Amino acid sequence: MTDVAGTIELLERLVAFPTISSASNLALIDYVEDYLSSRGAHTWRFPNVSGEKASLFAAIGAGGPPVLLSGHTDVVPVAGQAWSSDPFRLTERSGKLTGRGTADMKGFLACMLTAADAVSRGSFHRSLQLAFSYDEEVGCKGVDELLGHIMESQHKPTLCVVGEPTRMRVAVGHKGKVAATVRCKGIPGHSSDPAHGINAIGLAGEVISILSQHEAALRLDGPFAPRYDPPHSTLNLGRINGGTQVNVIAAQCDLEFEIRNVPGHDATLLLGAVAEQCNELALRHSNADHAASITVDVVTRYPALETRTDQLAGWRYPLGEDHSCVSYGSEAGLFAAIEQFPVVVCGPGDIAQAHRADEFIEKEQLAACCRFISQTLDVPA
């Protein structure tokens, strides 16, 4: 698996599919499935409800207990970003391969396909399983069918590697996430007589104060996890939208916020506290004639990842012992929730390049990833 030129050719093909989360990924899935099937892989496709997207699971090789490699096929939008070249055409500049998704995470997908080709032609101690998901960038929504397939399978992996960009440093932990929408509903009316209405934007202002207090408590009081940066759970208010025009008492105002929790910190309890305070706030602003309401609804959630060192004892080579933790999230926490095999995050490229204009990955990162996968497949069973 040293043919980085072949991996680059695969990456070029993958980048050319504009698999933004709002668009279909079927053309890419068709290409990947054909590529794998032609090399003897068994494949299982799982379409979403609309049939516009699909995840794909594949198994290949006659070796021992399998290693699972997992990556998402969707990428973030390019709108509003100042790219210096076509984001969906791979461009090389001084050893850097530029294009949307090169680092996050089609570079790893290309390495997955390179590994499948090598397994189809060579002999390894381990067989190979591959998982391709969708909608990871909008809340890890497209992995459930893959998880169900794995749980029902008789051939469960002995190790799962989720290939988010870590510059090939093995990460054994990441934060979890809960994203929620707060919907404030007031009573509309003419702005000349505020007493005859309830301003939803005013309610939202008080909700912001509640959220700010919780954010400060997390920052100052923890719980703390020193291996993370920042070393505590975080709360971020990301979006607010309300009102219709300046002379109308706002009837509705929506806020969107997220909690990124360190392992061991139950974000559900914090979310419950926010919901209770919002309900009390709505009651304070209601009376016999006017009733306000504030609801808190979860939009997406995924668990934190916390893989213990002893779970990796049989994988010391090539995983090493210098493991890290990352503050972003991934599908790894969902794979780990199956609780039947260890899960790590390790992939080519740098997270600092993700989601920005002129995203790139270095050739050497692709080569390092291919070597890593080959070494992993050759760990004796």
Image (cartoon, helix red, strand yellow):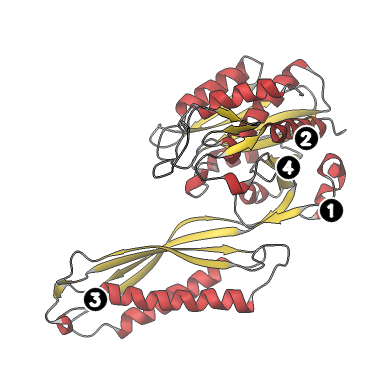
Cα separation between marks 3 and 4: 51 Å
- Mark closer to the observer (2, 1): 2
Q: Amino acid at mark 3?
A: Asn
Are circles 2 and 3 on residues that touch, CB within 8 Å?
no
**Amino acid identity at mark 2:** Phe
Residue 141: % across, % down: 49, 46
Mark found first going from the N terminus, 2 or 4 = 4
Q: Nearer the viewer, residue 134 or 58?
A: 134
* Residue depicted at x 53% and y 47%: 140
x then y, percent, for residue 91: 55, 28
* Residue that label 2 marks: 372
Give the labeled residue for mark 1.
310
Kind of residue sitting beneath label 1: Asp
Q: Is residue 306 visible?
A: no
Q: Disc 4 designates what residue?
A: 168
Nearest to N terminus: mark 3 or mark 1 = 3
